[in-house]
Amino acid sequence: MALGGAAPQRGSAAAAASMRRRRTTSGGASGGAAGTMLQFYTDDAPGLKISPNVVLVMSIGFIAFVAVLHVMGKLYFVRREA
C-alpha cells in the first residue's frame, strides 16, 4: 500500500473513479484513433486501391505537366511581345 495516503484504498469509491478516469483518458483516445486509422490500410476499406508507386508517378507527372505549361506560357508571352 502507499504511504502517506497518496493513493485511495483499493475498494473505495475514489479508487473506482480514479480507474475510470485513467481508462477514458489513455485507452479511449489512442485506441479509437488507432482503430480508425487502421481502416485506411486494410483490404476491407472502400474506395480506389492505388499503390504508392502509382501515386508517386502521377504526382511527378503532374509536376512535369505544370512545368511544361509554365514554359509554354513564357514562350507564348515572349513571341506575342515581339
Image: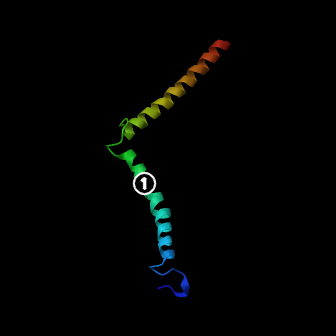
User: Residue at the spot x=49%, y=75% of the render?
Assistant: 13
**Residue that extends furthest to the right in the rendered view of this protein:** 81
Front one among 61 and 48: 48
User: Residue at the spot x=43%, y=58% of the render?
Assistant: 31
User: Residue at the spot x=46%, y=34% of the render?
Assistant: 59
Amino acid type at mark 1? Ala
* Residue 30 spot, x, y in % from top left: 46, 58
The correct choice, above or below, for 56 with respect to 21 in the image is: above
**Residue that extends furthest to the bottom in the rendered view of this protein:** 3
State the quadrant of the C terminus: top right
* Residue 52 spot, x, y in % from top left: 39, 40
Q: Is residue 82 left or right of residue 71?
A: right
* Residue 62 spot, x, y in % from top left: 48, 30
**Which residue in the structure is indicated by mark 1?**
34
The correct choice, above or below, for 63 with respect to 30 in the image is: above
Secondary structure, mark 1, is helix
Front one among 48 and 51: 48
Q: Is residue 62 left or right of residue 54?
A: right
**Residue that extends furthest to the front in the rendered view of this protein:** 13
The correct choice, above or below, for 61 with respect to 33 in the image is: above
Front one among 44 and 70: 44
Q: How are the residues colored?
A: rainbow
User: Residue at the spot x=68%, y=13% of the render?
Assistant: 81
Image label count: 1
Q: Residues within 10 Å of mark 1 (few under 14, many from 20)?
A: few
Front one among 78 and 7: 7
* Residue 10 spot, x, y in % from top left: 45, 80
